[in-house]
């Protein structure tokens, strides 16, 4: 439940257009407050409040840097990367969050490092990197399609199990309790939470 609450809070935070624009800018480079204010056309006080919210959520962090003349400046940057997916189908609504980890030393990772470190002429190097990138993108898209298909099958199965258990609970409470003792530990958390609310 705590994870759902945190993701709900994250969706609320990202639901604000100004905060999304701040995050887009911070993907380019670190910014300080007056730069963000100028880029966004928003007052510095409002920008500071948005930055405070983003920082308290752990999405960004600030770093104070001394400059040759004038007062030190606090630069803001993205703190951590994550991927947030919202899943809405006729059967369910939910969110999932993934935090990227350091890449495993796969064949593709080794190939990328080899291409990046190569001493070929720049034009040849870029051509090979662009081709490699296209191949990786094609594989990602295929995996995403497969994942979506499997998620639909999973959702269909979960919905059927939940509906079946609800029907049994209405018809025979003792049988429902027996089945929950036997299968409860193996049921997905979402089904258990939905049945608790039933």
Image (tube, rainbow, N blue to C red):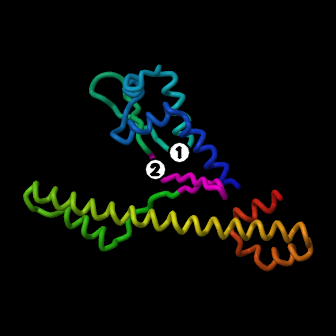
Q: Which residue is mark 2?
A: 80
Q: Is residue 35 left or right of residue 68?
A: right
Q: Residue at x 73, y 64 (%)?
A: 191
Name the spot of residue 185 as percent of width and height, x first.
74, 74
Q: Is residue 6 left or right of residue 176?
A: left
How many numbered dots are placed on residues in this image? 2
Q: Residue 9 got which mark?
A: none
Name the spot of residue 44 as percent of width and height, x first.
46, 22
In the structure shown, which secondary structural element does the residue marked by tag 1 occupy?
loop
Task: Determine whether label 1 and label 2 are within 8 Å by CB.
Answer: yes
- Please give the range of residues in magenta: 79-97
- In the foreground, 18 or 77: 18
Q: Which residue is mark 1?
A: 58
- In the foreground, 68 or 139: 139
Q: Residue at x 70, y 65 (%)?
A: 159
Say few, some or many: other residues with alpha carbon within 10 Å of mark 2 (under 14 / 14 to 19 / 20 or more).
few
- In the foreground, 123 or 65: 123
Q: Residue at x 85, y 71 (%)?
A: 168
């Amino acid at each position: 439940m705590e994870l759902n609450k945190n993701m709900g809070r994250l969706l609320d935070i990202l639901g604000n257009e100004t905060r999304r624009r701040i995050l887009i800018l911070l993907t380019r480079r670190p910014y300080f407050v007056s730069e963000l204010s100028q880029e966004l056309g928003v007052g510095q006080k409002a920008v500071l409040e948005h930055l405070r919210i983003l920082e308290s959520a752990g999405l960004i962090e600030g770093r104070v840097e001394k400059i040759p003349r004038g007062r030190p400046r606090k630069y803001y940057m993205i703190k951590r990367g994550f991927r947030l997916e919202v899943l809405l189908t006729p059967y369910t609504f939910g969110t999932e969050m993934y935090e990227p980890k350091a890449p495993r030393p796969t064949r593709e990772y080794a190939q990328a490092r080899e291409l990046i470190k190569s001493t070929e002429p720049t034009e040849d190097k870029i051509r090979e990197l662009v081709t490699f990138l296209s191949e990786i993108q094609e594989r990602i898209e295929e995996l995403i399609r497969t994942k979506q298909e499997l998620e639909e099958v999973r959702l269909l199965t979960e919905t059927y199990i939940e509906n079946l258990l609800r029907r049994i609970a209405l018809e025979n409470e003792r049988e429902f309790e027996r089945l929950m003792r036997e299968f409860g530990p193996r049921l997905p958390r979402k089904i258990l939470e939905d049945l608790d609310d039933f």
